Image (cartoon, helix red, strand yellow):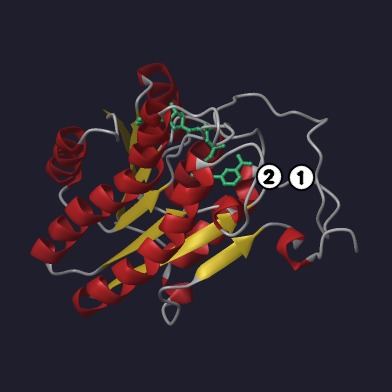
Amino acid sequence: MKLSGQVAIVTGAGRNIGEEVSKLLSSEGASIAVVDLDKGRADAVVADIVAAGGKAKAFICDVAKEADIEATVTGVVEAFGRLDILVNNVAISDNKHMLDITTEEWNRTIAITLTAPFLFGKHAAKAMIKADNGGKIVNVSSTSGYYGRNRAVAYTAAKGGVVNLTRSMAIQLAPHNIRVNSVVPNKIGSPVGKAEFDPTRPVVNLRKRPGIPIDLARAILFLVSDDSDFIVGTDLFVDGGCSALMPGNE
Ligand SMILES: NC(=O)c1ccc[n+]([C@@H]2O[C@H](COP(=O)([O-])OP(=O)(O)OC[C@H]3O[C@@H](n4cnc5c(N)ncnc54)[C@H](O)[C@@H]3O)[C@@H](O)[C@H]2O)c1
């Protein structure tokens, strides 16, 4: 097992990608802090992990609130005795045109999608530095952080921010033996903010199929394991090759 004895926080772990990441890291020996705003979802993921023989605990946290984030990190260290891994997975999308989005909607999307990964990274890194045992952080970005979109504006700005936040975090935390990287998915399972897979969602990539949560979970496992020990501050595209395509020339 690649993560025996380690402790991982996964944010937005109540369904879809975060759920799959939690289960995969657990199957490799990590204890999982299942962080979500939705208690029912978090409890269900914990129950599945425990039923499969793993260790997990639910932490109900609104990542828009720094006090919740700080309390969660403290609670995880109290419950499990250490913290080795943070997967900053949570995000919401505005799904808005810039002429229609309200300032409130903009601020909430930025708070959850960009500021929360920063704040979770800050408080988790402080705990990791205190323990003097190193650590690994993976920020979940998106192809929406590289390209503009007609149907979202705050989300694309936030995800672009996550990509460059990752580089500064990687530089600033490297002296503490904390490796920071990001993953850049495109169309994995159900759309952000939705529970159900939509088979009619158009998918253009080189694999000719939609991504599924385990595709991204495997990439994240790689980045938090020693298999990626020499990989720092990078963005790993997990997009079926869609970013390699020039529009109109597929
Ligand atoms: N699904 C995709 O096709 C896709 C594509 C590119 C990038 N991504 C990225 O992958 C990550 C996961 O996406 P997903 O589709 O699995 O998301 P999702 O919407 O299915 O799940 C998000 C989870 O976060 C929780 N959550 C929402 N707001 C919260 C808050 N304030 N505090 C705590 N928890 C909160 C929700 O309860 C939910 O369980 C996101 O960062 C997303 O941007 C997803």
Q: Residue furthest left?
A: 130
Residue at image position (78%, 34%) is 201
Q: Is residue 201 above or below residue 40?
A: below
- Direction from residue 89 to residue 248 in the image, left or right: right
Q: Are marks 2 and 1 in contact (CB under 8 Å)?
A: yes
The residue to which callout 1 is attached is 210
Q: Quadrant of the N terminus?
A: bottom left
Q: From mark 2 to mark 1, how far is it between C-alphas?
A: 6 Å
The image position of residue 197, as x and y in percent, is 70, 29
Looking at the picture, tell me which residue is in the foreground, 249 or 20.
Answer: 249
The image position of residue 225, as x and y in percent, is 43, 67
Decide which of tag 2 and tag 1 comes sooner along the chain: 2
Question: Does the beta carbon at disc 2 come under 8 Å from ligand 1?
Answer: yes
Q: Residue furthest front?
A: 99
- Direction from residue 120 to residue 242 in the image, left or right: right
Confirm whether residue 55 shows in the render: no
Q: In which quadrant of the rendered view does residue 193 lie?
A: top right
Q: Is residue 176 above or below residue 240?
A: below
